Amino acid sequence: MPALIADVAMPSADAVLAQASAENFRVASRVLPAAQREHLLAVYGYARLVDDIGDEQPGDRAAQLDWVQRELDAIYGGADASHPLMARLAQTIAACDLPREPFDRLIAANRQDQTVTRYADFDALLAYCDLSAAPVGELVLRIFGQASPQRIALSDRVCAGLQVVEHLQDVAEDLANGRVYVPIADLQACGCAEADLAAPTASAPLRAALARVGARAAELLSAGPPLVRELPWRPAIAVAGFTGGGRAALGALRAADWEVLAQHPRPSRVTIVRAIGRTLLEARR
């Protein structure tokens, strides 16, 4: 049975893990040892659970995030977690000696989502990405046994780039949830009113603002090849997969001339594979 918090059923472990696997696991599932795959899925499942609470759950989301915090208290205090997904995460934490701080940052990101709905400039958005995206990359490196300050710094940039690309893809969806992740400074610099984000089609000023932010996302993703170069071949292919996927998604947005309101530009599988190959080639230079 799903755990109940204030009479609200928390997402089931099976549903969360299925979604996490579909979103994050295609490349890793093909090249990594089974034990690492299981540990990665446990971390992705945790991140998906926290995001689902922050974005979709009915009821008091702050109280539900408090519940996740208490589950972490139990795990790091040597007690049993109550939710099957958190119990699975506890095994990964113990096996990989994972620190708590990245998990807490993911909770902090979703707490921020309950109160912060606009970002003044790109630096403010990057600070949010440091909570919402960078912790996952750090945990992945730790599961691979490849965490170092230099690699974590590169991973932080890649994860921020992936997060920004996702925000560019989901402008309409985010606005429907009351949030705008395109920095206000970039909208204003391009003469784009926030009302343009709710239009049926993307205006020229909105397209210019998205292109402006997209150029910064591309620069962040350029940290991918140097990170790949630092890793053994199996983790390198997995990281190239994440990086290539982000680059391909950005390419699809460019090819659509940043029309993200009337359509949902997504790269083809062939385009993604080519982007992964280019990332691996760049890493060898």
Image: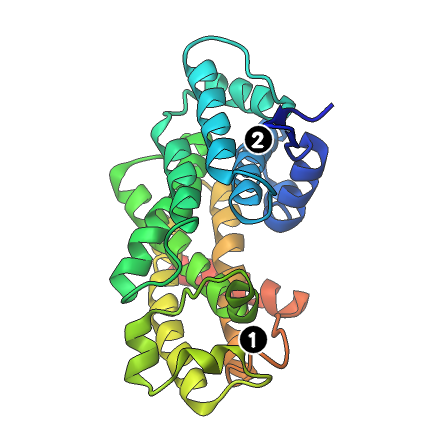
The residue that label 2 is drawn on is 42
Q: Identify residue type, mark 2.
A: Ala
**Front residue of 225 and 39:** 39
The spot of residue 78 in percent (x, y) is 45, 8
Quadrant the C terminus occupies: bottom left
Residue under the point 64% across and 78% down: 263
Quadrant the N terminus occupies: top right
Q: Earlier in the sequence, mark 1 or mark 2?
A: 2
Local SS, label 2: helix
Q: Residues within 10 Å of mark 2 (few under 14, many from 20)?
A: many
Gap in angstroms between the C-alphas marked 1 and 2 = 30 Å
Residue under the point 37% across and 26% down: 100
Q: Identify residue type, mark 1.
A: Ala
Local SS, label 1: helix
The spot of residue 272 in percent (x, y) is 59, 65
Residue under the point 53% across and 60% down: 177
The spot of residue 229 in percent (x, y) is 38, 50
The residue that label 1 is drawn on is 252
